[in-house]
Amino acid sequence: MPKLSRRQFMKYTAASVAASYLAEKRVHAESGEENKVFPLMTAGATTSYGICHFCSVGCGIEVKVKGDEIVSTEGLKEHPINEGALCPKGRSLKEMHNSDMRLTHPLVRKPGSDKWEPISWEEAIDKIAHKVKDVREKTFTDAVEIDGKKVTVNRLEGIFSLGSAEIDNEEAYLYTKFNRALGIHNYTHQAEI
């Protein structure tokens, strides 16, 4: 096989690109689609503005909605944090909302079962509250003895709390206050992991 020089390679590449362009133009001209205009996917969509929920950075986001489906997510150009940019997670908000696999209710796997079953939000919150109360009653320490002195500690050893990266500063403050009120001293935030 003869060797191609760099110049020949560039000539053949340019010629093949030009040929494919001309072939596409010919197909469109024969089918009458030459001047056909296709509508934008965002045509007729309503626009909402908000904050991206994926992390605590707080990027501004512009969401285009048609009916019950999100058709586009863009960074908000006027927002001081992201100035119109969005990371891949922010751009994928549309896919998460429109997904058939998105969970819309709590699930529980009962003892001995091999499948998850849906339960109501009230039932889920009740189960969590009762479990926290049970663990707190069993593992709460109000005082310890150090060097012969009784020292108040009010700590809960049986629960570790891991915060979400989707909460902003105000929510993180409330998360911390809630943990301290329960006596949980083993807690951290997902961003540290």
Image (tube, helix red, strand yellow):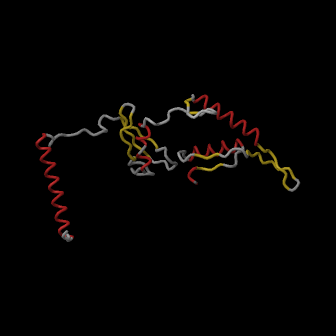
Q: Residue at x 87, y 52 (%)?
A: 149
Is 28 placed left or right of 45 in the picture?
left
The spot of residue 110 in percent (x, y) is: 62, 32
Q: Residue at x 63, y 33 (%)?
A: 112
Q: Residue at x 70, y 41 (%)?
A: 182
Which quadrant: the N terminus?
Answer: bottom left
The spot of residue 62 in percent (x, y) is: 39, 42
Quadrant of res 137: top right
Is 128 placed left or right of 88 in the picture?
right
Query: Is residue 81 shown above or below 65?
Result: below
For the residue pair 121 and 78, the one nearer the viewer reads as 121
Which quadrant: the C terminus?
Answer: bottom right
Query: Is residue 45 shown above or below 88?
Result: above
The spot of residue 5 in percent (x, y) is: 20, 71
For the residue pair 15 and 39, the one nearer the viewer reads as 15
Is 169 placed left or right of 62 in the picture?
right
